[in-house]
Amino acid sequence: MARDLIIGVDAGTSVIKAVAFDLQGRQVAVASTPNRVLLGPDGAAEQDLDGTWTDTAATLRALAARVPGLAARVVALAATGQGDGTWLVDADGRPVGPAMLWLDARAGRHVQALRETSASRLVAARTGNALNPSMQSGQLLWLQAHQPERLARAASAMHCKDWLFFKATGVRATSPCEGVYTFGNFRSLAYDDETLALLGLEAIKHLLPPIVDGTRSHAPLTRTAAAETGLPEGLPVVLPLMDVPLCVLGAGGMAFDAQGGLRHVGCSVLGSTGMHGWVTDNTAAIEPSAEAGYTIAMPAPGLRVRLVSHMAATLNIDWLLRLLGSAAELAGGAALPHAQMLERLDALVLSTAPAQAVYHPYIAQSGERGPFVDASARAQLSGFSATLGVAGLSRAVFEGIAMATRDCYTALGALPEEIRLSGGAARSLALRQMIASVTGRPVRVSNREECGAAGAAITAALSIDSHASIHQMLPQWVDAYLDEAVTLPDPGQTALYDQIYGQYRETAQQARAPWQALADIRRAHLDAAAQEIR
């Protein structure tokens, strides 16, 4: 039987997916398993390390049940996953407590204190990234202050994909991704002692795994992991980048003109969060901001992706659907199934008048991280009257996500010539139209169902030399999945949104002091309640 399949795994925050691709980039089959997030009252957001590996192995076995002869056909495995966070492992390879996820809010105070010093600007200049509570640096500072015994027991500080690679191969390593943009230098793609000193984390340097380039190296699947996954012992296992840059790759964010020059194309990955940015080959011209943003290596020499991420994209739509469902139940009816509600909501938003209210989509419990970082930021609806109905409210929520998209691109510089959209929200006609009209740019959708897993598989193909370069792979693996239809801006609405956008930004800026005051009040109330219980 021919060895003609590559498996890409994408271990997201809420779902783990395993996808089989043929060597031409066609998706053969997919299997998925829900991932469990453990939320705590203090802003904790954690996952069980063993549970994540067990669920990943089960997902691979489920994929084998869908693909006849998978074990005999697979040539490589690559597992990407959610970025940031802290996955501690001891010297024996055992977890040291649960993983702190990227959406864990406990490091907020430590990060804010660091951001108020000169170190914030200096760290951004070296790492290419602004400090935010999602990063491992702030979480390690929190652990130093609150759970030092955990750090004392740890031998390695990993990220999700690093943990999966370790469980599959027994090798402790990381890719030139989160470790570099947190503790290193974005130009050299190496750890940096000066950065560690600025962060006050010199003492944890021994926890940082070696950096390996997954496009050029791999390790064999161990006998134990082979038994757990159903895949053959010795299978090449590749350590790719985290999910976001691979989604950018898989969704068409790396685009070249006829002469081979890199185009200024934007890529927005709209899932629970929103990631927005573009790929650049001009590293020397990058001017990192200490306010917000990421600079991340791409799996190709000399390329970086500049990204700004807001914490909540479809989380806002989920909230809206829950609100509408609760209203239906209160009226004595029953909430419609999620998919049916989304379909009706899409049509409702497109049929109603624009700009009936202004909505800031800062609904995440951990606040906002782009284009500004503020753990106390909260969603707000303003500028409406008693005439605002369900249709106007729904449209305002969609417009707010589009405004946040424009806000993130604006923080990076000039708006791109075109925006390529992926993620669950890309299926929404209404949201595509909102983004096109709010940004004034055409929007194309990637029909690639699993962009992150595809990016991981591309990395694996390069690692095992089944393809010569990413440039060679793009036409079949990426470009073929871009929708021929383009959503164009509505010129009249774009002119209106240009005016609304200025007010959107100004209102958010003015709200930062009240957000902080409300956060202080809530914290004092919770502390008082805790004292009463004790």
Image (cartoon, rainbow, N blue to C red):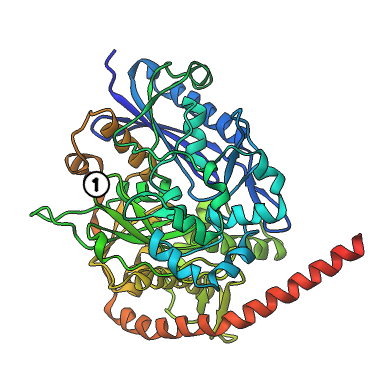
What is the secondary structure assignment of the residue under circle 1? loop
Task: Work out whether 437 lies above or below 507.
Answer: above
Find residue 388 and report its horizontal and vertical position in percent: 55, 81
Q: Is 24 left or right of 501, judged from the image as shown?
A: left
View extreme (top): residue = 1
From where the camera sits, is residue 188 visible? Answer: yes
**Residue depicted at 52% across the width and 55% down the height:** 135
Residue 456: quarter of image: top left
Find residue 486 and report its horizontal and vertical position in percent: 24, 61
Number of other residues with Cα within 10 Å of mark 1, as a class: few under 14, some 14 to 19, many 20 or more: few
**Residue depicted at 30% across the width and 36% down the height:** 215
Q: Is 192 left or right of 154, judged from the image as shown?
A: left
**Residue depicted at 56% across the width and 71% down the height:** 374
Query: The C terminus is located in which quarter?
Result: bottom right
Task: Work out whether 510 lies above or below 483.
Answer: below
- Number of labels in the image equals 1
From where the camera sits, is residue 97 visible? Answer: no
Query: The N terminus is located in which quarter?
Result: top left
Comparing 282 with 278, the one in front is 282
Q: Is 2 left or right of 57, judged from the image as shown?
A: left
Find residue 355 and report its horizontal and vertical position in percent: 44, 81
Q: Which residue is mark 1?
A: 301
Q: Is 294 left or right of 200, judged from the image as shown?
A: left
Find residue 442 and report its horizontal and vertical position in percent: 26, 66
Comparing 136 with 392, the one in front is 136
Question: Which amino acid type corresponds to the residue marked 1 in the rendered image?
Answer: Pro
**Residue depicted at 50% across the width and 31% down the height:** 166
Residue 181: quarter of image: bottom left
Comparing 269 with 517, the one in front is 517
